[in-house]
Image (tube, helix red, strand yellow):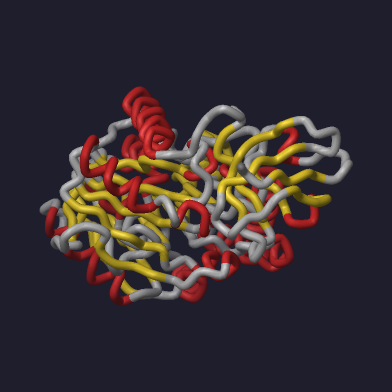
Amino acid sequence: MACKFYLMKRKNLLAEGGHPWVFSNEIEGYDGEYTNGDIVEVYNHESKFLGKGYINDVSQIAIRILTRDINEEINKDFFRKRLKNAYEYRKKVIDTSSCRFVFGEADFLPGIIIDKFEDIYVIQSLALGIDLHKSTIVDILMEEYGARGVYERSDASVREKEGLELTKGFLTKPFDTMVQITENGVKYYVDIAEGQKTGFFLDQKENRKAIQKLCKDADVLDCFTHTGSFALNAGIAGAKSVLGIDISQHAVDFCRKNAELNDLSDVVKFECHNAFDVLRQWSDEGRKYDVVILDPPAFTKARGTIKNAARGYKEINLRGLKLVKEGGYFITCSCSHFMNPELFKETIAAAAKDSGRVLRQVEFRTQAPDHPILWTSDESYYLKFYIFQVI
């Protein structure tokens, strides 16, 4: 019989409102015995059933709820159903040749990310409970979703909060970890073993497509280019010239390979620079571009560093705005959950004021729909993406 956990009498308990997390300081007590990773039942202070999930008392997030149905068993059929629901949804909303197949809590599978790159799948497990079901999920991917191979990228530091070691490697027979994909007509090499996170940022797929219409015959600057994805979308759309910059020489070398793959090496160039330094220098030199793109890494991953992050976002937006020609376009985004939409908007407005530029909003977008935003799980909303005309 499953161990039963009872929550404190407290206003606005997230789990009562549909959130899949139960924090350790919300638990009043429990009946029965458990081992970390076990499936347990969760009840509120009035003994009303809230859900079943896996327990890990090492983590601040003590229980992650998998189902709200007391009769639903957590077995292979459960995971088969969850994966089927996730994939059927994605077939409706996005090109699934490469996509985020499972987005953790937003797909009611807390603690796991699965990215699909053609017929190669990359799993990132972030919690003990889901770790114990990893082999089951791999079996389903092989049996039902045509997986040629599955690779694990469970090397995110957040695993340490679960008492887990960081790990990466093959979950099936070894295969070539340099995978080629096509997105929005652009070809990419994806290094699933050594690239950031799972090898490629799929969440900007629709946003990359959205910039294409602005880039025909334009001089484009793409900052924090990473794999060169925005730069290459500008190039394939017919830009006059594109310069992508990144602080990592390894990233720049990789971008050049992606440019060659698309026969864009003559138009799309890449250089290694610290964006904060070089944007100021180029502004002082009077350089101007028709389109400037800022896609920085998250400047904050914790609530306590928001003020410093806001200063960083303001500074980089200020410098980027100064490089846009009058009537040109400025594209800026934040991938930090803690940089909430209102604060990001205020930060951009402050940068525009200090730079003496007027912004006319063209579009506001978020992450691609294969990274769905679950309204009962605020953490699933993180990407803010603006396109402005600069007057």
Quadrant of residue 355 within the rendered picture: bottom right
Quadrant of residue 174 within the rendered picture: bottom left
Residue drawn where x is 75% and y is 38% of the image: 43
Quadrant of residue 364 within the rendered picture: top right
> Viewer-proximal residue, 343 or 244?
343
368 up-or-down from 333: above or below:
above
Tell me the quadrant of the picture where the N terminus can be found.
Answer: top right
71 up-or-down from 290: above or below:
above
269 up-or-down from 390: above or below:
below
Q: Visible in this render: residue 352?
A: no
Residue drawn where x is 47% and y is 66% of the image: 156
Q: Position of residue 320 (x, y in %)?
A: 51, 59
Tell me the quadrant of the picture where the C terminus can be found.
Answer: top right
Q: Is residue 34 left or right of residue 122?
A: right
Q: Visible in this render: residue 229?
A: yes
In the image, farthest residue toward the top: 92
Number of numbered tags placed on the structure image:
0
Q: Position of residue 182 (x, y in %)?
A: 20, 44
Q: Position of residue 200 (x, y in %)?
A: 33, 55
Residue drawn where x is 60% and y is 67% of the image: 161
Residue drawn where x is 36% and y is 40% of the image: 101
> Viewer-proximal residue, 131 or 209?
131
